[in-house]
Image (tube, helix red, strand yellow):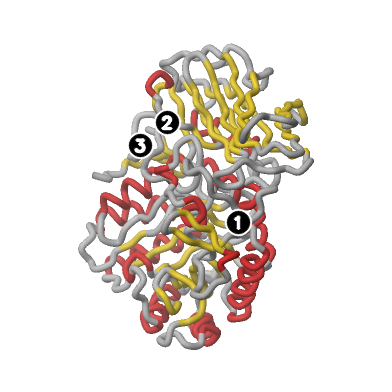
Amino acid sequence: MLFEKTPLSAAEIELVTTGKNADAVAETAMEDGALALYLTADVTPVRFVRLTWRLQTDPALLVLRDAWERSYADLGFTPVGENTRALPWYFLLTDGKNSAGFGVRVRPNAFISFRLTPESLTALVDCRAGGVGVELEGRRLRLCEFVFGDYPAATPFDALTAFCRLMCPLPARLPDFPVFGTNDWYYAYGHNTPAQVLRDAETLVAQSADQTVRPFTVMDDGWQQNGCAAPWLPSEAYADMAEMARKIRNAGARPGLWFRPLSAPPETDPAMLLRRGDRVCLDPSHPGTRALLRMDLRRFRTWGYELIKHDYSSYDLFSAWGKDMADTVTEEDGWSFYDRSHTGAETVLSFYRLIREETPGVLLIACNAFSHLTAGLTDLYRTGDDTSGRDWARTRDMGVNTLAFRLPQHGIFYLVDADCVGDADGTEPWEKNRQWLSLLSHSNTALFTSVPHPTDEQNEDLKAAYAAVLRRHDLRPVDLLTNKTPAVWEIDGRTVNFDWD
């Protein structure tokens, strides 16, 4: 074992409360192979629970972190003795031949991160209701379940895949068909038009004409009245969104749309707003917000959209991108959700569950959402920050990195969406993008493209990629330990070298 003893052994527990602790109690119990952490309090607001294990770990061992939400080209193995970053949700420890994973099961009722040193392991369990202590009012809350997996003689990739199954024992929500299609963001960047969207659908259908699976045409930001903001009503150019969906469907594609659920419409009831400085969004714990969200989602379904992509929720709620979050999702104190009796993670989980409840039969993509909280509640999850239709280096860094290091979550937490193959204006090096397209099409993950004016060469490549999506493939990165954008991959038993640079 890479640890001297299992991290599921007894830990030192410290409570961080608002004021003197009058009645808060944190306790652990072994249940179904996991170490469950419980918190009880009547009147004491609780901010954090900190657990510390005194463990000896070789500082030369390599550790891989996960990300709070999307990753930002920042995943990769680092020696334990040199790692200075927090480890959200879970981590994998390896010597290259043997591996071990430690973390929490998906959908915990708190935000959890770890710090690992050669001498100790610490878990910081954030119980706050925003930036203030949660007021449980007598509840006994199961905060999380710690799990440990030991994988001798397993590759790091295989070990991480097995550990993801341990963290997510319930079956994921997975579509029973390959998901592929177009998304206009990577060439329109919020300035799409109905004519462009329909052209995308017609081109897409022609490129996949011989296939039995209907592709998606997703309208990203730009269809609504205000750029990247509520209300979720069509602009004058789109006018009749139900008719737009029918036109996409008549072209042979399946209609999808993007929205930002926590953007506050003008003249919103102030009680429904979450304010931090000059930042304002809807508070998902307020009954009025929940009613508004249900109304928006039901409208999209009535219009006939078969895919809904919800975006920006982690940024809107906590005023930071995942790359800027450290041990906690917010360092700002003093602000709170409307409902202080539930932790921030409980509030976010309830919000994601509401979206799921209101979209039966609809494919959901979660973007800029908390990955561990969406597992089992969304069909697809954008695991990395945006690729680009204009900057190949960004596509390489964001796309390849997240596909390689979060592929073990695929088919277990959700269907991975490592993001788009974009070529906005023909200036991108297609010989590079072609490789990214090929890798994605053999990964079994979602494949979305954004190529508005394909050349003959691009048409043939896109046809081949859409055909490849229909077949199951065996794909894994080979140089995962030494390369943050792996260039050597095993695809269906063949070793393939990609020239990303």
- What residue sits 69% from the left and 43% below the top? 135
Above or below 240: residue 334: above
- What residue sits 42% from the left and 70% below the top? 221
Tell me if 324 is positioned left or right of 151 in this view: left
Gap in angstroms between the C-alphas marked 2 and 3: 16 Å
Q: Which residue is mark 1?
A: 378
**Which residue is more in the foreground, 81 or 397?**
81
Mark earlier in primary sequence (2, 3) = 2
Q: Which residue is mark 3?
A: 484
Above or below 387: residue 186: below
The disc at residue 85 is: 2
Provide the secondary structure element on which disc 3 rests: loop
Q: Amino acid at mark 1?
A: Thr
Gap in angstroms between the C-alphas marked 3 and 1: 27 Å
Gap in angstroms between the C-alphas marked 1 and 2: 28 Å
- Visible in this render: residue 130? yes
